[in-house]
Image (spheres, rainbow, N blue to C red):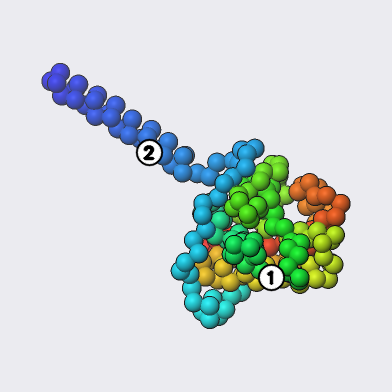
């Protein structure tokens, strides 16, 4: 009888331990709040993806997103597609007039603001922020000392279309926005006087219907 009681107690103890481990694992899998550090992104995957004509056929605007967070790897792929470096001379996946490269991509992700350093493939931490509730907000910022505002508008559009095609190829939702809180965003991103927020583009996984 004593052996049965002892065995029962041991089984309960093992069950409790396993339950605790499972709960810890689930908690660990959750996206943790961003720390005040720069983030080195995984190398972008430059192979595969959907055929271009199919991606064009699937390209569309979607304004609603699920709450699923985007992984660092998917974010790395997204940013490289948007305006990453694709040649040894430093030229980008999106063109700019006279190769001025006046557009910088800023990222609001996981309750923090970052600048995308395409040359080092990393996110430079700026500050914590609650300015956006979507999984990822890309902010297209033009340096108007390098390029006119009119041409910067055009160059931002090239980046936006890259993002649209990437999202179509990866079953992501996105919307390009011109009606944005430019002054508020500029303050959150610590922009200098020659920089101006031009557009934003929100990206996330589709909302389940």
- Identify the residue shown where x is 66% and y is 68%: 94
Res 174 visible: no
- Identify the residue shown where x is 46% and y is 44%: 29
The earlier-in-sequence mark between 1 and 2 is 2
Estimate the x, y position of residue 53 in percent, counting from the top left: 53, 81
Estimate the x, y position of residue 147 in percent, counting from the top left: 82, 65
- Identify the residue shown where x is 76% and y is 48%: 189
The answer to whether the residue labelled 1 contacts the one labelled 2, judged by CB atoms less than 8 Å apart, is no
Estimate the x, y position of residue 190 in percent, counting from the top left: 78, 46
Question: In screen coordinates, is 52 left or right of 20?
Answer: right
Q: Secondary structure at mark 2?
A: helix
Q: Secondary structure at mark 1?
A: loop
Q: Nearer the viewer, mark 1 or mark 2?
A: 1
> What residue sits right under mark 2 in the picture?
22
> What residue sits right under mark 1 in the picture?
95
Q: Residue furthest top?
A: 2
- Quick one: label 1, few (<14), some, or many (20+) residues within 10 Å? some
- Judge whether 15 appears above or below 155 on screen: above
- Identify the residue shown where x is 15% and y is 24%: 4
Res 47 visible: yes
Q: Nearer the viewer, residue 133 or 16?
A: 133
- Judge whether 34 appears above or below 105 on screen: above
- Quick one: label 2, few (<14), some, or many (20+) residues within 10 Å? few
Q: Nearer the viewer, residue 160 or 123?
A: 123
In the picture, which quadrant includes the N terminus?
Answer: top left
């Amino acid at each position: 009888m004593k052996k049965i009681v002892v065995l029962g107690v041991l089984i309960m103890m093992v069950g409790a331990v396993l339950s605790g481990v499972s709960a810890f694992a689930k908690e660990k899998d959750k996206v943790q709040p961003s720390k005040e550090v720069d983030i080195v992104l995984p190398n972008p995957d430059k192979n595969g993806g959907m055929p271009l004509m199919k991606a064009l056929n699937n390209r569309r605007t979607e304004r609603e997103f699920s709450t699923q967070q985007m992984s660092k790897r998917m974010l790395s792929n997204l940013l490289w597609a948007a305006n990453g470096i694709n040649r040894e001379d430093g030229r980008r996946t999106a063109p700019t007039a006279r190769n001025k490269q006046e557009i910088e991509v800023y990222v609001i992700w996981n309750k923090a603001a970052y600048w995308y350093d395409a040359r080092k493939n990393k996110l430079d931490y700026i500050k914590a922020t609650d300015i956006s509730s979507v999984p990822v907000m890309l902010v297209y910022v033009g340096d108007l000392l390098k390029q006119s505002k009119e041409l910067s508008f055009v160059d931002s559009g090239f980046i936006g279309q890259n993002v649209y095609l990437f999202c179509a190829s990866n079953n992501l939702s996105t919307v390009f926005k011109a009606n944005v809180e430019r002054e508020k965003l500029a303050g959150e991103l610590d922009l200098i006087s020659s920089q101006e927020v031009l557009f934003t583009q929100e990206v996330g996984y589709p909302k389940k219907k």
